[in-house]
Image (cartoon, grey):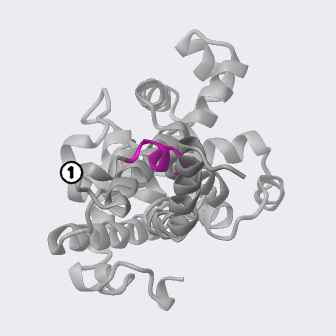
Amino acid sequence: MRLTADTTTDRHVEDLVREHLPLVGHLVREMLGRVPAHVNRDDLTSAGLAALAAAAKSYDPTRGTPFGSFATVRIRGALLDELRGLDWASRSVRHRARKIETATAELTANLGRTPTDTELAETLGVAVAELHSAADDVQRAVVLSLQGFAAGTAEDLVPDRAQGPEELLLHREKIGYLHQAIAALPERLRNVVESYFLDERPMAVIAAELGVTESRVSQLRAEALTLLRDGINSQLDPDQVVGVDRPEGCVARRRAAYYADVAARGDLRTRLSHTTPLGTPTRAAG
């Protein structure tokens, strides 16, 4: 068989891909260690392999850049693109979250209780089904933020460099504050959070144990997550805490008491005890 230039090039590309397959696995594993657990390994691996093949085809050895370095940049870029597609916390979702939180706080203050879905939907001028859809999007965004402690972008989830000592310390302290914020929740909200997120129990089971509807459990879950986020922000970034319309009202007083309780639950030493010096959970933290 006569070899042509195209045949030689194809074989060279194939050799580059085969030789650097472990690079894709390494970069995927590295990224999985920095993102929430819901990110699918197979999806990232597929994106990485496609990027490796594209890099092999476009590689120009005359430029003096080692192929490994060239491919690494391409693969990481493809993995980030894949994460962007999974990034639920878009601006529109966060905007809807703020509107729902504000309306809920106002109605709670006016009614003296948590509003029903119908009352909240009427206040927002949307159908109940649309409210549920928005709540689901917000729920995923909040959970993603809690799991990854990110501002809502793929770039924040996966930094290009390892965390420095100050960043790692802040990351560990955030995890510690999360534990304190959960412990400071009112008993019913704490039970919902621990049952749903930590024990991964079905919502129907939680509802049956509490003697309420699944819709009510969903409301309690959303209320708890709002408190958790603001409880952590009250200690680390007070400007991000969502305010209420009546700073002197009962809702504001209850929130202030909750923030104080979060702060009193421990000190830097106890917060850091939930993670190892490398930022991984300790056995005691579960």
Q: Main secondary structure of the magenta part?
A: helix
- Compared across the picture, whether 166 is left or right of 116 comes to left
Is 157 left, or right, of 193 in this rendering?
A: left
State the residue at coordinates (45%, 62%): 31
Give the image quarter of residue 282: bottom left
x and y percentages locating residue 35 in the rendered image: 47, 59
Disc tally is: 1
In-image side of 164 versus 194 (left or right): left
In front here: 229 or 54? 54
Magenta region, residue range = 53-59
Q: Is residue 286 visible?
A: yes
Percent position of residue 80, x then y: 43, 46
Residue sticking out furthest to the top: 125
- Rendered view: 71 above or below 272: above
Q: Residue at x 37, y 82 (%)?
A: 275
Foreground residue, 207 or 52? 52
Which residue appears at 38% of the width and 70% of the height? 180
Instruction: Indicate the amino acid at tag 1.
Output: Asp
The question of residue 13 being in magenta is answered with no
Q: Could one spot residue 224 in this view of the protein? A: no
- Element type where label 1 sits in the image: loop
Q: Residue at the far left: name it.
A: 166
Q: In which quarter of the image is the C terminus?
A: bottom right
Q: Mark 1 points at which residue?
A: 237
Horizontal and vertical percent position of residue 205: 83, 59
- x%, y% of residue 149? 38, 56
Task: Look at the picture and state if 139 lies above or below 22.
Answer: above
What's the residue at 62%, 69% (across, down)? Answer: 198
Q: Is residue 213 above or below residue 21?
A: above
